[in-house]
Image (tube, grey):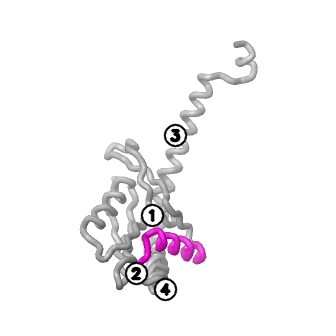
Amino acid sequence: METEGKSGADPAGWQISKDKAKSDCRKKAQESQKGMKTEKEIFALVDNIREIGFELHGYLRHGHLEKVYENGMVHRGRKAGLNIEQQYPLKVYDVDGTVLGEYIADLFTERCLLVELKAVKRLSEEHTAQLLGYMRACKVEHGLLINFGSPRFEIKKYILSSLS
């Protein structure tokens, strides 16, 4: 036991630093999920994503699996210089801030815009409810719902104004 004390391997001290590291990690994750962009920057980002999606739909048309469109959006977004993450884990929070689990976002762009992709004939109310539920639970204010599955490209922008 004396050897452990001399080497600095103090279990109690280790636990405190481990808890602090977890706390710091949680704070960084929350900050990254919020994204620190102005409304003007977010709307410019939305315009950019819309153009990328429209061009991708024009090239591939409808009929592919959602994953193909997801890969295409990531490829073209990164070529355009966007920080776009595929299958990005976001924390799901309860009203009191307790982490309940994780949601895996199709795309998370510039750490502030949640993008939910679909490849269906027609968007439904369930798709909208799904996106709004994800945005609320993950405390993300801006979201896009994009459908590549219909002959016409569909995109809808949603904003949650109070995320407290």
In the image, is residue 79 above or below residue 140? Answer: below
Pointer 2: what residue? 62
Q: Position of residue 43 (x, y in %)?
A: 43, 75
Mark 4 or mark 3, which is nearer the start of the sequence? 3
Distance (Cα) linking label 3 and label 4: 46 Å
* Marks 4 & 2, CB-CB < 8 Å contact: no
In the image, is residue 130 above or below residue 40? Answer: above
Distance (Cα) linking label 4 and label 2: 9 Å
Residues packed near mark 4 inside 10 Å, few (<14), some (14 to 19) or many (20 plus): few
Mark 1 or mark 4, which is nearer the start of the sequence? 4
Residues packed near mark 1 inside 10 Å, few (<14), some (14 to 19) or many (20 plus): some
Q: Which mark is residue 23?
A: 3
Viewer-nearest of discs 3 and 4: 4
Name the residue: 53% across, 67% down: 84
Q: Quadrant of residue 18?
A: top right
Q: Position of residue 115 (x, y in %)?
A: 42, 67
Lateral position of residue 155 relative to residue 53, left or right = left
Name the amino acid type tagged 3: Ser
Name the amino acid type tagged 1: Asp
The residue segment tinted magenta is: 62-81
Name the amino acid type tagged 2: His
Pointer 4: what residue? 59
